[in-house]
């Protein structure tokens, strides 16, 4: 019997996270409306949780602070390191359609 796989779009998940790097204030709405389980990929869940943790403590959300938060949580390697975070941050051309 084949195991069913939940459909997901990794690029859409990256776009959502990358949008927060471009416009950190977006996390405020996401904090109320999104849950880590909205992300299929475990690494995207971890990144989202790190962003939420920074938001909840009033810290800036940028490549450096998210990297530091993931290091504190011992999850930086899980997400693919700073290289993957940088790729997400640089891959979003606009946040116009995030809503």
Image (cartoon, rainbow, N blue to C red):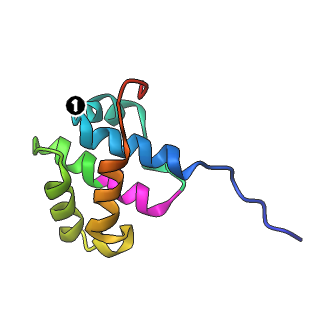
Q: Position of residue 19 (x, y in %)?
A: 33, 38
Q: Secondary structure at mark 1?
A: loop
Horizontal side of residue 25 vs 60, given as left or right? right
Asked if residue 73 is positioned above or below residue 86 in the image, the reply reads below
Q: Which residues are magenta?
A: 41-49
Q: Position of residue 28 (x, y in %)?
A: 26, 31
Write down the residue under mark 1: 25
Q: Position of residue 2 (x, y in %)?
A: 85, 68
Whether residue 38 can be seen here: no
Horizontal side of residue 11 vs 35, given as left or right? right
Asked if residue 69 is positioned above or below residue 94 in the image, the reply reads below
What residue is drawn where x is 42% and y is 37%? 34
Residue 21 falls in image quadrant: top left
Whether residue 9 can be seen here: yes
Asked if residue 24 is positioned above or below residue 18 in the image, the reply reads above
Horizontal side of residue 61 vs 32, given as left or right? left
Horizontal side of residue 68 vs 44, given as left or right? left
**35 or 5, nearer to the observer:** 5
Q: Position of residue 35 (x, y in %)?
A: 43, 43
What residue is drawn where x is 20% and y is 70%? 71
């Amino acid at each position: 019997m084949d195991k069913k796989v939940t459909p997901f779009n990794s690029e859409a998940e990256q776009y959502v996270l990358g949008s927060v790097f471009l416009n950190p204030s977006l996390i405020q709405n996401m904090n109320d409306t999104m849950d880590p389980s909205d992300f299929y990929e475990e690494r995207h869940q971890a990144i989202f949780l790190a962003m939420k943790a920074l938001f909840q403590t009033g810290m800036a959300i940028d490549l450096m602070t998210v990297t530091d938060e993931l290091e504190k949580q011992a999850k930086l390697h899980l997400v693919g390191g700073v290289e993957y975070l940088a790729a997400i941050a640089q891959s979003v051309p606009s946040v116009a359609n995030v809503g």
